[in-house]
Image: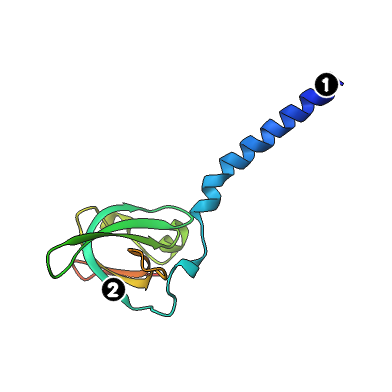
């Protein structure tokens, strides 16, 4: 009887730990429904504040200045490392402080977010998905 209770507690603990460990992974990958797929030519020009090439999606933070001089931080999401490498992206070419132009889908909810399809560097080099 004690063995059965101990095994049930141990099994429950292991299951709970496994579910908690997977929670961040599940929330990191989401549907493209968060982005307006009807708008494919949304363009942002700004300065790279942060960039991380990673799976399942790479991310970038872009500081965008408006005509009145105010700046807004935009969260940019784009493809996985594997896909970007197959498409010829040179990760060393995109650095914090670089002036870039990003083109893609804006947020469907009006947030300062976009899904990027291509990026043009200050020297005119373009990387596309």
Query: In terms of secondary structure, where does tag 1 sit?
Result: helix
Which residue is more in the foreground, 113 or 77? Answer: 113
Q: At 83% across and 25% down in the image, what residue appears?
A: 4
- On screen, residue 36 versus residue 31, left or right, reads left
Name the spot of residue 1 as percent of width and height, x first.
87, 21
Name the spot of residue 118 as percent of width and height, x first.
34, 70
In the picture of the structure, the residue carrying the numbered disc 2 is 43
Most extreme residue toward the left is 68
Q: Within the image, what quadrant is residue 40 found in?
A: bottom left
For the C terminus, which image quadrant? bottom left
- On screen, residue 53 versus residue 24, left or right, reads left
Q: Within the image, what quadrant is residue 42 found in?
A: bottom left
Most extreme residue toward the right is 1
Which residue is more in the foreground, 72 or 61? Answer: 72
Name the spot of residue 22 as percent of width and height, x first.
58, 44
Query: In terms of secondary structure, where does tag 2 sit?
Result: strand
Colouring used for the render: rainbow
> Where 39 sits versus 126, above or below?
below
In the picture of the structure, the residue carrying the numbered disc 1 is 3
Among numbered discs 1 and 2, the one appearing first in the sequence: 1
> Where 63 sits versus 108, above or below?
above
């Amino acid at each position: 009887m004690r063995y059965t209770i101990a095994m049930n507690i141990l099994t429950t603990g292991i299951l709970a730990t496994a579910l908690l460990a997977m929670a961040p992974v599940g929330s990191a990958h989401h549907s493209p429904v968060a982005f307006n797929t009807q708008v494919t030519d949304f363009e942002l020009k700004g300065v790279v504040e942060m960039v991380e090439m990673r799976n399942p999606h790479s991310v970038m933070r872009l500081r965008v200045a408006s005509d009145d001089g105010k700046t807004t931080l935009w969260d940019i999401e784009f493809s996985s490392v594997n896909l970007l490498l197959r498409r010829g992206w040179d990760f060393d070419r995109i650095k914090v402080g670089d002036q870039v132009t990003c083109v893609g889908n804006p947020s469907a909810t009006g947030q300062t977010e976009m899904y990027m399809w291509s990026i043009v560097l200050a020297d005119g080099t373009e990387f596309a998905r």
